Amino acid sequence: MEKKINFVFITTNLLNKHQYVGEHSTNDINCKATKNYLGSGRLLLKKTKQYGSENFERKILEFFPTKQEAFDAQAKYIRLYKTHVTQGGYNKDWTGGHNVKIWNEESRKKISKIQTGKKHSEEWKKHHSEVLKGKKHSEETRKKQSESMIGKNVGKKRTAETRKKQSESRKGKKDSNETRQKKSNATKGKNNPMFGKSLYIIWMDKFGKEIADQKFIEYCKKIKGRKLKPFSEEHKKNLKIAKIGYIPAVKGIGFKQLMINAYGEEEGLKRYELFRCRQRDSKLGKKIKNRKSKPLTQEHKDNISKSLRGKKHNLKEVECPYCKLRGRGGNMTRYHFNNCKYKNHD
């Protein structure tokens, strides 16, 4: 796909005034990559490394509607500004570039057909992986990638063949505990795209209230009376492990040691103590629930009555700031102070 903006430029070495003519194509002339582009000639790259890119300056000479026209125009400017190596410049070719060829649509299809199905060797994959390790896209690049993909996959469905291939490629593969933890942290709390949202709110923002109401009614009808598949025994076991740190018993090893072996000493002891607390709370709850309290004897009731006879609540006397009434007890706070009928009285 041809770029929108095509231009010829001249790059000047500010220290010795040697120059280079080149052409460039882009969709955004103000992006960082385009602004910093000085040229790709081998001699020029060698000199920018030698003198430093800060000592070079680029100036746009002319804009063109197509890349081919911009490429062809280089020859004119190389002769005009005398930038060939034989004239003290950095251009090795009188026509500019590196004998670039603009492929037509037919040629591209042929190349695509030849390359389809070819796979990289394990050695190439390993080398490529090591080269890219530790490198991260800038926020600007990530934003551009995101914007370029908006709307491209809307309404597209994967074929049965594609789904089958994806399924087979993942079979037998399991993420390490570290990877699983990273994935979990990446979608926790505010990082989760659905944090503080609901389907109805999303529909409201996207379609408006009327359509959102219709969709919500349809959704409710769809899930009403739906029977969920029962969990398998393996699934139940995994849920139990995730919830309380349960690990199947091993003969000759205590539960505490099993937890330490599975999660490390610090985390294992924390999980063990948590499990013991839950176990104690569960037993105590069952005891209280099943316990039948005995009725108080008459003698016990009389003793309680005698112990409370003649005792008065030691309540402090207070005065309402609005009606100046003095008194004790709950009625004062109930009917006076902020609730006093004279509060707003002039």
Image (spheres, grey):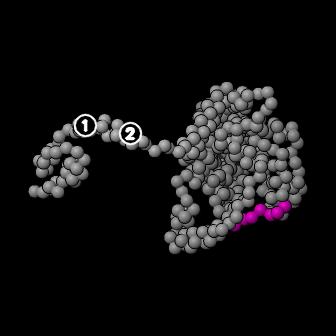
The segment highlighted magenta reads 155-161
Mark 1, residue position: 311
Q: Locate the N terminus and report the quarter of the image it occupies.
A: bottom right
Asked if 130 appears above or below 186 in the picture, the reply is above
Asked if 331 appears above or below 265 in the picture, the reply is below
Query: Residue at 57% of width from left, 41% of height from top?
Result: 287
On the image, the x and y values in percent for residue 86 come to 74, 38
Q: Which amino acid does label 2 sit on?
A: Glu
User: Please, which residue is most extreme toward the front here?
Assistant: 299
Identify which residue, 319 or 76, lies in the foreground.
319
Q: Which mark is residue 299?
A: 2
Identify which residue, 275 or 80, lies in the foreground.
275
Horizontally, is 190 left or right of 71 in the view? Answer: left
Packing grade of label 1 (10 A; few <14, some 14-19, many >=20) is few
CA separation, marks 1 and 2?
A: 20 Å
Q: State whether the magenta stretch is mostly helix, strand or loop.
A: loop
Horizontally, is 277 left or right of 251 in the view? Answer: left
Residue 69 visible in the current orientation:
no
Q: Which of marks 1 and 2 is in front?
A: 2
On the image, the x and y values in percent for residue 232 come to 77, 52
Q: Which mark is residue 115?
A: none
Secondary structure under the numbered disc 2 in the rendered image: helix
Q: Which of marks 1 and 2 is nearer the N terminus?
A: 2
Asked if 52 appears above or below 171 in the picture, the reply is above
Query: Residue at 66% of width from left, 34% of height from top?
Result: 48
Packing grade of label 2 (10 A; few <14, some 14-19, many >=20) is few
Quadrant of the image occupied by residue 275: top right
Q: Does the magenta stretch include residue 30?
A: no
Q: Locate the C terminus and report the quarter of the image it occupies.
A: bottom left
